[in-house]
Image (tube, rainbow, N blue to C red):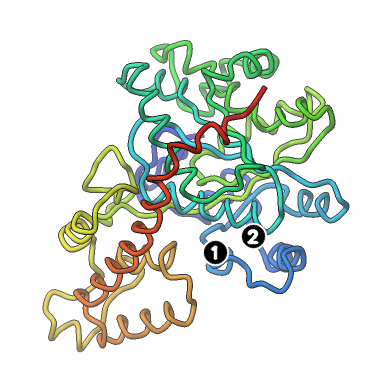
């Protein structure tokens, strides 16, 4: 559902304005991740620390997390479902969610069904079918580079797996009215009929493993909060078809470089750092475009300090690139006190991103030969 107030719009096809996450929790009807849920996760994963994105509240809300964790404790393991829309290059906002998903796969030792929604992007974007297929393969390389277990990871490409997807999608579609789609996504009579049908396809991976394995299996969906409307509909429909409602765990957005409102995008290169960016490109983007929370002059900055809440470099460290809580706390303290300058903060952030991307890109180079291992066999 597109939510408008104070210029905020949040839905799968548009994120605009300053995002108020507390308001989204109320308006989307989400459950905030609390200490009880964190304790339950920690109990299951054992001695190792919780993922830093959980500790810092980057993944901040969900649906039915207590239930899905309870099922896991009883021996009824969930599977993970997430995905991407292949219409352009992958940016670090995508990678943030996927690397957290890898942690979930590793710690809970579960299967992952990863959907490539090539049909959706063809229907919504001014791109040819051939261009979408090119981006599907490119995006696969990034997903493989994350390091998911090939024995427990299954790629679903909507058009390639239509043989198993479509019969289930029509069962979902039969339960969804046009008025529900209009209310959820802000559609009107000018939307093409494929886009109206599409959410039925996005629902299928949430219960497809239950069909393939002939038993009801819980599903956990890690995703950014803007995708919630798709899965609200899915949760309404699946019990009517005899399956569990999917649980979800939802993250906040990685801000665009410019510090403007909304979220990072790969369609506007100034707004995003791409998975394939060179060290020089990362350096240029951070130095030239990354919005600073520093003062106008170095003297003023030393005296008054910087604002980490709006500083994009700090937010990138907090969300993704600095796993060490003590190190992050020291950076925050030094920046707020004025001891650490904007230039020094940017330099450190550039180094962290480039180290991360260098390792990711090395794995990405080898990924082309591995694609067949990940495609769902039917």
Vertical position of residue 3 compared to residue 215: above or below: below
Label 1 Cα crowd, 10 Å radius (few <14 / some 14-19 / many 20+): some
Q: Front-most of 19 and 195?
A: 195
Q: Front-most of 183 and 287?
A: 287
User: What is the number of the mark on residue 57?
Assistant: 1
Relative horizontal placement of residue 293, taking residue 319 as reference (left or right): left
Relative horizontal placement of residue 254, taking residue 223 as reference (left or right): left
Task: Return the x and y of residue 108 as percentages of the image width and height.
Answer: 71, 55
User: What is the number of the mark on residue 33?
Assistant: 2
Task: Return the x and y of residue 81 as percentages of the image width and height.
Answer: 62, 39
Task: Return the x and y of residue 314 as percentages of the image width and height.
Answer: 34, 69
CB-based contact (under 8 Å), mark 2 and mark 1: yes
Residue at the location (78% across, 22% down)?
241
Vertical position of residue 254 compared to residue 76: above or below: below
Vertical position of residue 45 compared to residue 258: above or below: below
Name the secondary structure under disc 2: loop
Disc nearer the start of the sequence (2/1): 2
Name the secondary structure under disc 1: loop
Residue at the location (67% across, 64% down)?
34
In which quadrant is the C terminus drawn?
A: top right
Measure the alpha-carbon separation of dots 2 and 1.
8 Å
Residue at the location (38% across, 12% down)?
190
Residue at the location (40% across, 84% down)?
330
Task: Return the x and y of residue 294 as percentages of the image width and height.
Answer: 22, 74
Q: Quadrant of residue 333?
A: bottom left
Q: Front-most of 120 and 149?
A: 149
């Amino acid at each position: 559902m597109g939510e408008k107030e104070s210029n905020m719009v949040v839905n799968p096809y548009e994120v605009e304005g300053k995002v108020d996450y507390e308001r989204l929790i109320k308006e989307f009807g989400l459950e905030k991740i609390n200490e009880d849920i964190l304790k339950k996760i920690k109990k299951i994963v054992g001695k190792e620390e919780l993922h830093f994105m959980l500790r810092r509240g980057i993944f901040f809300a969900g649906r039915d997390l207590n239930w899905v964790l309870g099922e896991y404790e009883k021996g009824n393991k969930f599977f993970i479902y997430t995905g991407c829309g292949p219409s352009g290059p992958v940016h670090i906002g995508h990678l943030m969610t996927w690397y957290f998903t890898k942690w979930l796969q590793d710690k809970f030792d579960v299967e992952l069904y990863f959907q490539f929604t090539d049909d959706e992007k063809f229907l919504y974007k001014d791109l040819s079918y051939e261009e979408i297929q090119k981006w599907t393969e490119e995006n696969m390389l990034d997903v493989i580079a994350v390091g998911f277990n090939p024995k427990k990871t299954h790629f679903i490409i909507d058009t390639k797996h239509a043989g198993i997807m479509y019969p289930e999608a029509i069962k979902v579609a039969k339960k969804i009215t046009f008025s529900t789609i209009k209310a959820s996504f802000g559609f009107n009579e000018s939307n093409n009929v494929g886009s109206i049908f599409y959410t039925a396809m996005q629902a299928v991976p949430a219960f497809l493993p239950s069909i393939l394995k002939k038993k009801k299996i819980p599903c956990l969906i890690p995703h950014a909060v803007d995708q919630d409307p798709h899965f609200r509909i899915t949760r309404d429909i699946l019990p009517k078809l005899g399956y569990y409602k999917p649980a979800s765990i939802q993250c906040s957005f990685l801000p665009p470089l410019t510090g403007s409102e909304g979220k990072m995008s790969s369609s506007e290169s100034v707004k995003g750092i791409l998975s394939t960016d060179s060290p020089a490109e990362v350096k240029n983007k951070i130095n030239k475009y990354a919005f600073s929370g520093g003062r106008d002059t170095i003297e003023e900055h030393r005296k008054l300090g910087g604002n980490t809440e709006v500083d994009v470099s700090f937010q990138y460290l907090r969300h993704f690139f600095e796993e060490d809580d003590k190190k992050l706390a020291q950076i925050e303290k030094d920046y707020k006190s004025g001891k650490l300058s904007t230039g020094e903060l940017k330099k450190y952030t550039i180094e962290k991103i480039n180290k991360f991307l260098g390792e990711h890109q090395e794995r990405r180079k080898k990924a082309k030969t591995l694609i067949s291992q990940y495609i769902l066999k039917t």
